Amino acid sequence: MAANSAYYGGMLAAGMLVTGTLNTLLTKLQDKQCVGNCSDPDASKREYFEQPVWQTLNMFYGEMLCLACFYLVSLLRRHRDDGSRDGYIPIAEPTDENESSNARIAEDVPTTDALPVAASVGAEEPPTDTLAAEAQLKPISGWTTLWMWIPAVCDLMGTTLMNVGLFFTTASVYQMLRGAVVIFSGLFSVLFLGHRLERFQIVSLALVVLGVTIVGLSNVVSPPVQAYSHSKRQNPGLGEDSQEVDVEVLKAILGVTLVLGAQIFTATQFVVEEKIIRRYHLTPLRAVGLEGSYGAITVMAAIPVLHLAIGRYNPGGYFDASAGFRQIIDNPSVWQTSIYIMLSIAMFNFFGLSVTRYLSATSRATIDTCRT
């Protein structure tokens, strides 16, 4: 059983690493897609796809695919088990001839009420001991599914901040900064889940703090030189070298701050998801789907509000809904990468929630940092 558990856990970790890395690279690739003035020889005048809100909505659409898969699997299982219940085939109706013989046998056979129940022979062992207690958990249904709205909002905030931060840093630095989620996950697990950290775990967290600090400072000292059209369109006078250096440093600081701040929401999401999964019987496939559905509803409600409040006064900005929609529709490279991101994020969240279910939120955060 231990071997099966290790093999299953390794499979989940590998799937999470592969799909997570793919998602980061695809998102950065989408950020680099030119959507305006692409033929201009001056790279600073080109417009690139910078729509973090639409990217967050795309992520939740990807998670909703898991809910569709869940209902499809449930439908197939119901069809397969048609005419049976819990794996048992209904027996034939008794006849008068065998009823009398069964009655005579019953008189000589003692009752089995006091006998211990034996485990079924040949049953497949669960990958971990946590599955043994799942039968005792109450299923999540009705209003209780609204608990998944909490991690959905945390996911919304964290993903949006990280998408904006990714504009101002490289994919490698971005991913290394995401290692800070281990720090917050460990802290929140102790405070809200009652977990206990061993001495070696505390030392490991201290090393993570040191590593994240070094990476953040290196990004500020040597900021990536990239042509971010949105900032330069809003500040056309940034032509002097000294001013451009100052702006690049400020953008690097902003990128580091946004990515690190997003890890607080991501860690909260992990811990809340573990709390819900420990209390209710909820498969990872359905959990990701519910979270995606509630997140998509929230973002779709926020898009027109943000557009009217901010976007219409800043044409082409992050909250200009009409500009973002046109950029997606009019540029095949953008909507094609959106499809790939949807698929990768659906698989990534499925593997991630499976790790949380069978291990813990801190384990999930630790595995996530290995993408670096």
Image (cartoon, grey):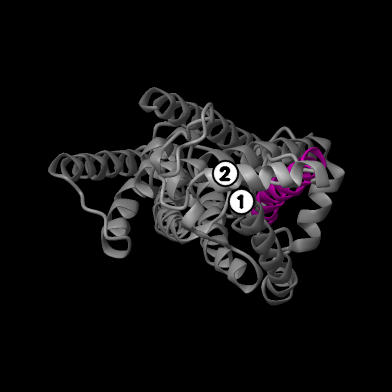
**Residue occupied by mark 1:** 288
**Residue 15 appears in the rendering:** yes
- Does 369 sit left or right of 201 as displayed? right
Q: Secondary structure at mark 1?
A: helix
Location of residue 208 in the rendering, given as x and y in whole percent from the top left corner: 26, 41
Mark 2, Cα crowd under 10 Å, few <14 / some 14-19 / many 20+, is many
Indicate which disc, 2 or 1, sits on the residue closer to the N terminus: 1
**Residue lying at 58% horizontally and 70% vertically, measured from the top left:** 144
Please name the amino acid that badge 1 sits on: Val
Location of residue 207 in the rendering, given as x and y in whole percent from the top left corner: 21, 39
State the residue in front, 197 or 310.
197
When the figure is inspected, residue 277 is found, relative to residue 116, above or below; the finding is below
- Does 358 sit left or right of 138 as displayed? left
Q: Is residue 254 magenta?
A: no
Which region shows up in magenta? 54-81
Please name the amino acid that badge 2 sits on: Asn
**Residue lying at 64% horizontally and 61% vertically, measured from the top left:** 295
Q: Secondary structure at mark 2?
A: helix
Mark 1, Cα crowd under 10 Å, few <14 / some 14-19 / many 20+, is many
- Measured in 3D between alpha carbons, the distance from the residue under mark 2 to the one under mark 1, in whole angstroms, is 6 Å
The picture quadrant where one finds residue 102 is: top right
